[in-house]
Amino acid sequence: MLTKRIVPVFVLSLLTFSTSVGAQVVTTPATAPPPEAESEQAVKARKELMKSAFALLEEVSSEAPSLKLAENRIRVQMTVADLLWPYDEARAREMYKTVQESLAAIIGEIDPGDPQVYNTTNLVSQFRNEVLHKLAGRDAKLALEFLRATRQPQLFHHGGDYKQPDQEAAMELNLAGQIAAQDPKAALRMAEASLSKGVSSGLLNVLSQVQAKDKDAAAKLAGDIVKNLRPDEFGIDHEAINVAASLLQMIRAREAANPNSAQGAQLQNMGGLVVDEAVRRELIEKIVTAVNGMAPHRTGNAHGLFMALKNVMPEVEKYAPTRAATLRRRMGDFEKTIP
């Protein structure tokens, strides 16, 4: 029986070697067969080696359930699934399903009172991230199914009155960002679905990735993000603050970005996401509302907002003239707190 620790590495080496086995058939000049016979010999050797490799993979996968530690079983299953995918996708999918079930079983037995609960949840997160990284470029739908089937419960509630990030939503958006290059429409659907749970920082990466593939779709997503921003929560929601400030830097009003004007040509060269003026106006108005209504002890968390607004005061004067004076006072008070 092969040593469990070296089996995955050995199999990997074997499969890598098999891709070039045809070039490694050595013959002497005196006995070298004709080119046609040599080609047949190389093909036969490759097939035999691949057959042996698959047999070894099956042996490894069949032995995995006998491993005592669940983390070792899952590691072997993940390795086999990854190696099999290019050669036997159906079998690889079965193995990933087994990994999914194994992780779900561990998650179902997590006990918040267990002294090792942090180690367990961190290990599960590591496995999930590794599988998602492998599946993202192969099958986005399968990756999303895996992610949702292995959700971890929210075990720890931090003190304070600040809104805590949704780790599961963050993982979905991270996946959306990974698959955006291959399937921007799927990434967009995932981002839109995430908005029903609130605005989070991961949306910015998805927005940037989608923009590279479909500017109109990205503009729509930007508009939807702006609509879902809630100024009354900026004081307790760090992610919303970050998203609002970053969006203000990313998006340009379509009217201002008219390539026929000197200013528009400059904005086009700067890049950025072009949206309707109404979207940028709504964003600026929401940021102004949030800053003007923010309690003094919360303004330290809004540094990004103050800095972003400082660069667009002419637009503030245009879109929210009645509140511009109050905003200038708030910004002045804020600058006094900066060392």
Image: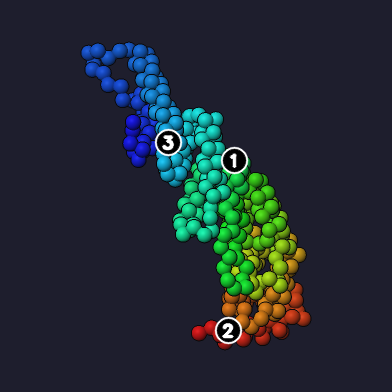
- Drawn side of residue 90 relative to residue 277, left or right: left
Q: Quadrant of residue 305?
A: bottom right
Dot 2 falls on a residue whose secondary structure is: helix
Question: Which residue sits at x=65%, y=45%?
Answer: 186
Q: CA distance from mark 2 to mark 3?
A: 64 Å
Circle 2 residue = 335
The residue lying toward the viewer, choosing from 111 and 41, is 111
Q: Quadrant of residue 261?
A: bottom right
Q: Give the amino acid type for the residue marked by disc 2 in the picture.
A: Glu
Circle 3 residue = 66
Q: Is residue 319 above or below residue 51?
A: below
In the rendered image, residue 54, in percent from the top left (x then y), is placed at: 43, 27
In the rendered image, residue 270, in percent from the top left (x then y), is placed at: 59, 62
In the rendered image, residue 66, in percent from the top left (x then y), is placed at: 42, 36
> Is the residue under label 3 in contact with that under label 2 (CB below 8 Å)?
no
In front: mark 2 or mark 3?
Answer: 3
Circle 1 residue = 142
Q: CA distance from mark 2 to mark 1?
A: 50 Å
Dot 3 falls on a residue whose secondary structure is: helix
Crowding at dot 3, Cα within 10 Å, few <14 / some 14-19 / many 20+, comes out as few
Q: Is residue 235 visible?
A: yes
Q: Give the amino acid type for the residue marked by disc 3 in the picture.
A: Ser
- Drawn side of residue 28 relative to residue 191, left or right: left
